Amino acid sequence: MLERLGVIFLGGCAGGCTRYVVARAWPTPNDGFPWSTLAVNLIGAFILGVVVVLATQRRGPRHLRLLLGTGFCGALTTFGSVVVAADELLAHHHAPTAIAYLATTAVAALLVVTAGVSLARSLLTRW
């Protein structure tokens, strides 16, 4: 049990630090499109697509799902921030940007998770 929690903790520290670095390096202006939040969410969706395939095939390391899926991606992705960013855009009367952001997030996340699943499956068939 403690080993599993430790693996999740390590992954979470890495994911949270990564998100922080991206947000600091790529700040979002008050009236701008939240590109950094979109980027980390899409990266996380892609990684989760790969992890799900590897975990279901039991081809990865024993704690891969906990380290990358639960820990890293759980801390990296900020889907709660999607709603906050959209709400802030709406509050500042930037409805078209908020709608574009929400639509882009939903569609792009589905596309990249599908790409992650497809990539992982094709790599597994080659191995």
Image: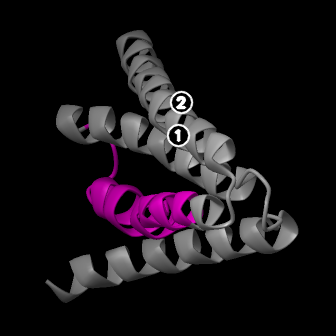
**Residue placed under numbered mark 1 in the picture:** 105
Q: Position of residue 16 (x, y in %)?
A: 56, 75
Find the residue positioned furthest to the front. Answer: 93
* Residue 23 in magenta stretch: no
Cβ–Cβ under 8 Å for marks 2 and 1: yes
**Residue placed under numbered mark 2 in the picture:** 108
Q: Position of residue 118 (x, y in %)?
A: 42, 17
Q: CA distance from mark 2 to mark 1?
A: 5 Å
Figure quadrant of the N terminus: bottom left
Q: Position of residue 89 (x, y in %)?
A: 64, 60
* 65 or 73, nearer to the observer: 73
Image position of 26 with respect to 115: above or below: below
In this picture, residue 20 sits left or right of residue 113? right
In this picture, residue 12 sits left or right of residue 37? left
Q: Around disc 2, counting alpha carbons within 10 Å, would you say few (fewer than 14), some (14 to 19), or many (20 or more)? A: some
Find the residue positioned furthest to the left. Answer: 1
Type of the residue with mark 1:
Thr
Q: Around disc 1, counting alpha carbons within 10 Å, would you say few (fewer than 14), some (14 to 19), or many (20 or more)? A: some
Q: Which residues are magenta?
A: 59-87
Residue 21, by quadrant, is bottom right
* 111 or 118, nearer to the observer: 111
Main SS of residues in magenta = helix
Image position of 10 with respect to 92: above or below: below
Q: Secondary structure at mark 2?
A: helix
Q: Residue at x 35, y 75 (%)?
A: 7
Q: Residue at x 82, y 68 (%)?
A: 27
Image position of 58 with respect to 125: above or below: below
Type of the residue with mark 2:
Ala
Q: Secondary structure at mark 1?
A: helix
